[in-house]
Image (cartoon, helix red, strand yellow):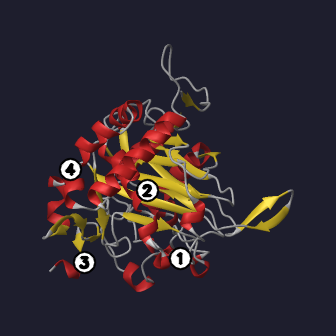
Amino acid sequence: METITTHRHRMNGPGVLPPPMSPLIVDVTPRERASISNVANILMKAFDHYEHPDFISALHLNAFQLLPERIAGILSRFGTDFSRNQYGALVFRGLTEVDHDALGPTPPSWKETDYSKLVKYGFICSLLHGAIPSKPVQYYAQRKGGGLLHAIIPDEKMSHTQTGSGSRTDLFVHTEDAFLFNQADFLSFLFLRNEEQVPSTLYSIRSHGETNEIMAELFKPIYKCPKDANFADEANAGEEVTTSILYGNRERPFIRFDAAEQIYNEKAGQTPEAMHNLVRFWDEAKQLIYNGFIPDSGDLIFVNNHLCAHGRNSFVAGYRNENGQLVKCERRLMLRMMSKTSLINIQSVTQSNDPYLIMEEHYGKLFHSQQ
């Protein structure tokens, strides 16, 4: 049965629903979970890998034919709902069983990941994107085009960074790749391990309700966004492109926002007006962040990257709290997949021989390896 977490009661008028303050939480039934697992096993035998061209080209057909009807229906409706009542994120609780023995210990970082152990999960994630419908894509900016599925693992060498590999600082909410014009439309985060019990944070532009005076200022194309901490400092410097934070329909806007890079990064070089507007907006947005869900093994969070930002709380990687004592455990392991609803609209920034590999480096600028 679908359940919705409690919303803050703030009415905009008689008969009008309050703004959504939390994601829809879908409890996957044992029958649905078994069906998804069986489908993934069948696909592994038929295609061997989730990046097989025949599988990806027929992804939407496979998704609607093979996913449980209720799951496919929820995703299909989610993919076209941009209303004022749509939070922009779904939680599928208990989507799949995770075989931790077969998975083995969490590797030291994403670089040591054995993706042969993750093939089944790649099929499951891609089917969900296919039901939107949306096509999984890879970004050269993310792991230099390292495939459609990314293992997000805490790396001690990057523990204090504002990246997925960080851990010891809060990862501020952000829309993925806010420094790109062709950022992902949808994201999925499948949790294979979260023994540290780290809450995931979500923030929706819809939680503000009607567009107010502070939000209206964010439609101005005056804001800069440096590339994130995955890039060297010298790669971040000197980017002068400005754009808006909010875009699209002024009553039901989309958002492109990264608090860490646009507000707290001194190298962003915002004008006084831009910084003033950003700080006012962030002061309001911080009060609307949702962190009431702690993912468990097998849970998946699905996000509309134009409506909802994501992040996580700080934690000590490889340790969980038991009665006030830190006890050693396996480190967190999460799988991310990104997708675009239209391959046609991104062809100007894709690899010429691979329509799924996006070569955008920063606001329309392409990586040199495009040639």
Front of the two marks 1 and 4 = 1
Q: Calculate the distance from the C-alpha at mark 1 to the C-alpha at mark 3.
A: 25 Å
Tell me the number on the disc at residue 109.
1
Judge left or right: residue 42 versus residue 54. right
Marks 3 and 2 close (CB-CB < 8 Å): no
Q: Calculate the distance from the C-alpha at mark 4 to the C-alpha at mark 3.
A: 21 Å
The kind of residue on which mark 4 rests is Ser
The kind of residue on which mark 1 rests is Ser
Q: Position of residue 244 (x, y in %)?
A: 34, 54
Could one spot residue 186 in this view of the protein? no
Are there few (<14), some (14-19), or many (20+) residues within 10 Å of tag 1? some
Q: Position of residue 306 (x, y in %)?
A: 37, 48
SS class of the residue under badge 4? loop
Q: Position of residue 213 (x, y in %)?
A: 45, 40
Q: Which residue is mark 2?
A: 121
SS class of the residue under badge 2? helix
Q: Is residue 251 above or below residue 62?
A: above
Q: Which residue is mark 3?
A: 367
The kind of residue on which mark 3 rests is Phe
Q: Calculate the distance from the C-alpha at mark 1 to the C-alpha at mark 4.
A: 32 Å
Residue at image point 51% right, 37% down: 207
Q: Calculate the distance from the C-alpha at mark 3 to the C-alpha at mark 2.
A: 30 Å
